[in-house]
């Protein structure tokens, strides 16, 4: 998968969330589309506070240019 390729390129750890066979298991029994929407704010806050704890600026992540290309060609 793409996440494994990116991990080998830029380094890092992968945390999996699922209803079964994952690092964190949720037994919500909600449809997948609903779960995905509900998990997003939690994951964004987790990433935000982790970056702050590591002394990083969450508004300027490292290696972003390697993954995201802005449509208008500017690097903000």
Image (spheres, rainbow, N blue to C red):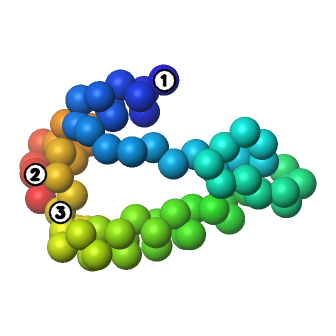
**Sequence-wise first label, 1 or 3:** 1
Observer-nearest of 64 and 69: 64
Observer-nearest of 16 and 64: 16
In which quadrant is the C terminus drawn? bottom left
Q: Which mark is residue 12?
A: none
State the CA–CA distance, disc 2 to disc 3: 11 Å
- 46 relative position to 53: left or right: right
Q: Which mark is residue 60?
A: 3
State the CA–CA distance, disc 1 to disc 3: 25 Å
Q: Which structural element holds mark 3? A: loop
**Sequence-wise first label, 1 or 2:** 1
Q: Please name the residue shown 89% across and 54% down the image.
A: 29
Figure check: 28 above or below 1: below
Q: Please name the residue shown 23% across and 37% down the image.
A: 10
Residue 48 location (% of width, % of height): 36, 71
The 10 Å Cα crowd at callout 1, few under 14, some 14 to 19, many 20 or more, is: few
Q: Please name the residue shown 70% across and 47% down the image.
A: 18
Q: Which structural element holds mark 1? A: loop
Of badges 2 and 3, nearer the viewer stands 3
Determine if residue 62 is in view.
Answer: yes
Q: Which mark is residue 1?
A: 1
- 27 relative position to 44: left or right: right
- 4 relative position to 23: left or right: left
Q: Residue under label 2, please give it.
A: 75
Q: Please name the residue shown 65% across and 54% down the image.
A: 24
Q: Which structural element holds mark 2? A: loop
**Sequence-wise first label, 2 or 3:** 3
Q: Quadrant of residue 49?
A: bottom left
């Amino acid at each position: 998968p793409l996440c494994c390729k990116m991990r080998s390129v830029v380094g890092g750890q992968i945390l999996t969330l699922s209803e079964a066979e994952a690092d964190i298991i949720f037994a919500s029994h909600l449809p997948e589309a609903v779960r995905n929407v509900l998990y997003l704010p939690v994951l964004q806050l987790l990433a935000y506070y982790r970056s702050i704890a590591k002394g990083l600026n969450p508004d300027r992540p490292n290696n972003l240019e390697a993954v995201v290309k802005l449509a208008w060609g500017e690097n903000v």
